[in-house]
Every structure is written in structure tokens, then in C-alpha cells.
Image: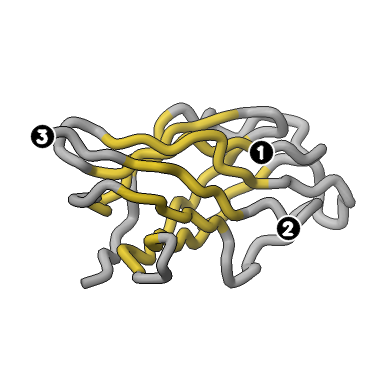
Amino acid sequence: MAATSTPTLAGAPPPPEGLPLAGDERLPDLTVAEAFLLEDGRLAMSIRSDGPGPLIATTVPVRVTRAEGDILGVLQIGPTTLLAGARATVVTPVVVREPGSYEIVLDATKQSDEAQEFNNAFRALLIPKG
């Protein structure tokens, strides 16, 4: 069963003054920097904006699957603001019960304009405790 929820985003600062105006060509580039499991088996991930521009008040879709293709969760992050070069931790409601290779894809439906679209997938070997 796929989890659908809005996870908690920690570490994202409020939008500062001087953000680019509409039409500014500096785009964000979202990537997953790391993925890990909390004590209760929930998936957490560190995301960052590697592009030259910030992500501003945007909701980002996330898909979590086993390497074999089974979908564990489809959820939304945000809306959030993430400045260029900034990093934030996202705690999801997706619980990993079996060890294995998992794939996390940010913006799989390409709802957000980004500097690069090819680097939105991240694979991780996740091993639950116990």
C-alpha cells in the first residue's frame, strides 16, 4: 500500500529579501544527498538545491520504490523554499521493513522547472534495525 502524506521539512529558511523575480533564468536543481532510516523504520532523506537559483514556495512530488519497481510511497514535500546551495532533511511516512535497494525520485512528474532533470533519482541500500 502506498503512503500519501505531506512529510515534515526541517532546516528550510523562510524566503529572504532579494529573491529572484518572475522570469529570472536561475533555476533550482533538486537532488537527494542521502537517505537513511530512523529508529522506527521511517525513511528520511537530505535534499539539496544544487542549481544556481532557489526553490521558492514549491511543492515537490516524491516517489519511493524498491529497486524491483514496487512502489512504497508517493508523497509531496512542501510547499517549501530552499535557497541555492541549501540542504534540508525530510522525514517521510514511508516505512522500510525489508533490507534492500530503494530508489527515491524527486519531481518524477517534472512539475518544477529545474536546471537539470536527469539527476532527480537516488538509489540507496537501506537496512532496517532489528
- Disc on the earlier residue, 1 or 2: 1
Which of disc 1 and disc 3 is earlier in sequence? 1
Q: Residue at x 80, y 42 (%)?
A: 20
Q: Secondary structure at mark 3?
A: loop
Identify the residue position indicated by label 1 in the image.
49
Which residue type carries mark 3?
A: Gly
Q: Is residue 106 left or right of residue 99?
A: right
Q: What's the distance in space between the residues labelled 3 and 1, CA to CA?
A: 34 Å
- Residue ID for mark 2: 118
Camera-near label (2 vs 3) is 3
**In the rendered view of the protein, which quadrant contains the N terminus?**
bottom left
Residue displayed at 53% across by 58% down: 105
**Residue 58 marker:** none
Task: Report the side of 93 relative to 90 (left or right).
Answer: left
- Name the side, left or right, on which 27 lies relative to 13: right
Quote the CA–CA distance across marks 2 and 3.
35 Å
